Image (spheres, rainbow, N blue to C red):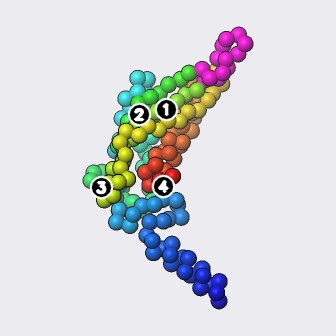
Amino acid sequence: MKRILALTIVLLALCSCGIYSFSGTSIQPDVNTITINFFENKAPKINPSLSNDLTEAIKTQFRKMTRLEQVDMDGDMEITGSIVGYDVRATAVTADEVAAQNQLTVTVKVSFADKKHPEEDFNDKTFSAYAVYDSSNSLDAVESSLCVEIIDKIVEDIFNATVAQW
């Protein structure tokens, strides 16, 4: 009987605070909508599908992991950003001074506004992720799979910085 009572108290405490969820988010109960703007690609080197892929991945993450309704404008929360870097560089060099591995790095600048709780806002926060590939492959051959991996990392970081606050 004492266990049931203790469990009931714990469950009521979790439910009554209103901002904890089992998905790891901490969204205030009075926040109901979010606007996720298109992430424009401003990097010197352009991947034509990256902007759309990143924007859609962020929208999907919020749709799956939060209760927020996505609206085109004037959401209680708003995420705005742009891709500012898309760079390839050698990361491992052989004895013959030839690249053995290359690294693709994507850098994104994000601004977040919570209209109901402005203390959570941030501007121009930089998120970056990379993936390494063998230099025997051309970037064209591996670019799409690398971008999926990189986008997943960046989306997780953006999600955590905005609503999970980790």
Residue in the image at 45% along x and 40% along y: 54
The foreground one among 25 and 74 is: 25
- Name the residue beneath numbered marker 4: 164
The x, y position of residue 160, in whole percent, is 49, 50
The answer to whether the residue labelled 2 contacts the one labelled 4, judged by CB atoms less than 8 Å apart, is: no
Name the kind of residue labelled 4 in the image.
Ala
Task: Give the mark nearest the N terminus, 1 or 2.
Answer: 2
Q: Could you tell whether 22 is left or right of 163 in the image?
A: right
Occupied quadrant, residue 28: bottom left
In whole angstroms, how far apart are the C-alphas of marks 1 and 2?
7 Å
Residue 45 part of the magenta segment? no
Q: Could you tell whether 118 is left or right of 17 in the image?
A: left
Q: In the rendered image, which quarter contains the N terminus?
A: bottom right
The answer to whether the residue labelled 1 contacts the one labelled 2, judged by CB atoms less than 8 Å apart, is: yes
Residue in the image at 37% along x and 39% along y: 124
Q: Residues within 10 Å of mark 1 (few under 14, many from 20)?
A: many
Residue in the image at 55% along x and 80% along y: 9
Element type at mark 1: strand
Range covered by the magenta-colored residues: 90-102
